[in-house]
Structures are given as C-alpha cells and as structure tokens.
Amino acid sequence: MDVKLPISAWPAGDRPRERLLTAGSAGLADAELIAILLGSGAKGKSALDIARQLIQQFDGLPGLGRISGACLSAIPGMGPAKVARVLAACELGRRRELQRNRKRTVIRTPSDAAGLLAPRLRDELHETFWVLLLDTKHRVLAEWPVSRGGLDQVNVDPRDIFQPALEHRAAAVLLAHNHPSGDPEPSAADIALTRRLAEAAQLLGIRLLDHIIIGDGVFKSLAEKCQLTEGKKTYHSPQSPVVGLRRGEQKGQ
C-alpha cells in the first residue's frame, strides 16, 4: 500500500478510524490515534504520516503534551484546526487524570500528594509552585497556584502561601513545584526555601507537611529526605508545627 495515498483511499480494514470503531481503541498505535484527531493529511502526506512525525519529533506522547501551539503550527500540514484538536486532546487527558485523582482527597503519603499534583506540573515548561491547603485530617481544602518562574527557578513570597492558608483556615500545607529538566532532585535553593517556609509556618501555627518536587514521571519528597528543617530530626509528633509524611507511616507498614 502506498503510504502517500490519503487514508480515505486505504482499504477499510487499514483505516485507523474504522479499526477503532470495530476493534476498539486499545488496538491502535499512538500515531493512529493522533491521525484520527488530525482528521486529514496535507499535500503528499497522510494524517498518519503527520502523526508519526509529531511522535518522532516531540519524543512521544509525554513530549507532545508539553508542546505549545506555536511549535505544533511550525510542522508542515499542521493548520490551526489540527493544532487546536491536538492541544484540546492533551488538555482533556490532563483534566481526566486530575478529576480522577481529586477523589483521593486525603493526603496520607508523599505519593498521594504527587499523584494529585503531577498532572498539573509535569508538563510545565517553567518552574511552577503550588500549595495544597489541608485541614486537621489532611483533607484537601484547596489546590493553590503560588508562582510561575523560569526554566530553573521560581521566586516564592511566603505571603502568597500563608495568606490563602489563613483565609481557608488550613491546619497544614504541602508545597510542590516542578523541575522542567525532569530531574526532581532538590537543589540547594529548594532546600533553603523550604526551611524558610517551615520557620514561617511554625510562627503561624500551621504544619508544613512536605515539599514535593515533580520530575518526569518521578518525584522527590523533602520530608523523606529529612530536608524540611535544619535539625537532624525531621519527623515530629502530630502536635508539632512541622510534620513530615512518610510512604509507609500512615499505612501501618
């Protein structure tokens, strides 16, 4: 079969849309699903050709989810309608994951926090800082965007964290930001900022549970690394203003 033919000229059994409707979406490759989104090709290229180029050029679906509309528009054959459909599909995927995770409203472990916030943060091209506002039972009161910075740092004003915490009458907060590089290892600046915020939380009588750094499919918890405070002891009793979360601690492990 000549791949330069439009998909509409292919045998019905080879067309991605028809295969999806008859056999289900699970049997289609990523490029075939994207080709269905695109709907049509361009001069000398089928929709599947363009879809394969997108996957190859942007390192698969995770990379495609991070790409701006301007970058997509630079691909030959990607007009405004195709770009809009791809961006909308990526956003729907993120929102589906967010809505599914939002049902898990109690934060018991660093994994709970990372699962809730990763869909917001992992595709960001700049460092972005969020805070979870929690009640006394660690139930999420609000997910609060604090600041957006550059490629490798973000400036955070403690007032932007603790003012909403006070307004929501939060008993505890959990900090999170992303590393666009994909490496979630905390920097010296991350650790210094966390300790300053821990001191501010203690003065206000608000517990700082953790600071989660989101990378590419992985995360780091400063509480688990004992880097929330200057002292050697990071995990305190529940009555202390600073309480760390550990993966197995709340599960009876």
Image (cartoon, rainbow, N blue to C red):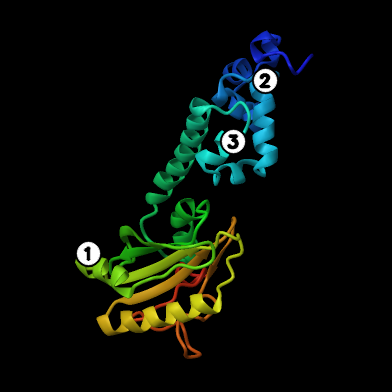
Q: Is residue 239 left or right of residue 166?
A: right
Is 54 in front, or is 241?
54
| First in sequence: mark 2 vs mark 3 | 2
> Could you say which disc has been placed on residue 168 in the image?
1
- Label 3 sits on a secondary structure element that is loop
Nearest to viewer (mark 1 / mark 2):
2
Instruction: Residue type at mark 3: give it.
Output: Ala
Q: Residues within 10 Å of mark 1 (few under 14, many from 20)?
A: some
Instruction: Residue type at mark 2: give it.
Output: Ser
Question: Alpha carbon of mark 2 to alpha carbon of mark 3: how far?
Answer: 17 Å
- Label 2 sits on a secondary structure element that is loop
Q: Residues within 10 Å of mark 2 (few under 14, many from 20)?
A: many
Residue matched to label 2: 46
Q: Is residue 223 visible?
A: no
Q: Residue at x 49, y 34 (%)?
A: 89
Q: Quadrant of residue 195?
A: bottom left
Q: Quadrant of residue 17?
A: top right
Instruction: Residue type at mark 1: give it.
Output: His
Question: Alpha carbon of mark 1 to alpha carbon of mark 3: how far?
Answer: 44 Å
Q: How many marks?
A: 3
| First in sequence: mark 1 vs mark 2 | 2
Q: Is residue 82 visible?
A: yes
Q: Where 151 falls versus 200 (above or below)?
A: above
Q: Residues within 10 Å of mark 3 (few under 14, many from 20)?
A: few
Residue matched to label 3: 74
Nearest to viewer (mark 1 / mark 3):
3
Q: Residue at x 42, y 47 (%)?
A: 98
Question: Alpha carbon of mark 1 to alpha carbon of mark 2: how far?
Answer: 53 Å
Nearest to viewer (mark 2 / mark 3):
3
Q: Is residue 135 left or right of residue 249?
A: left
Q: Residue at x 54, y 27 (%)?
A: 79
Q: Picture coordinates of residue 83 (x, y %)?
A: 52, 32
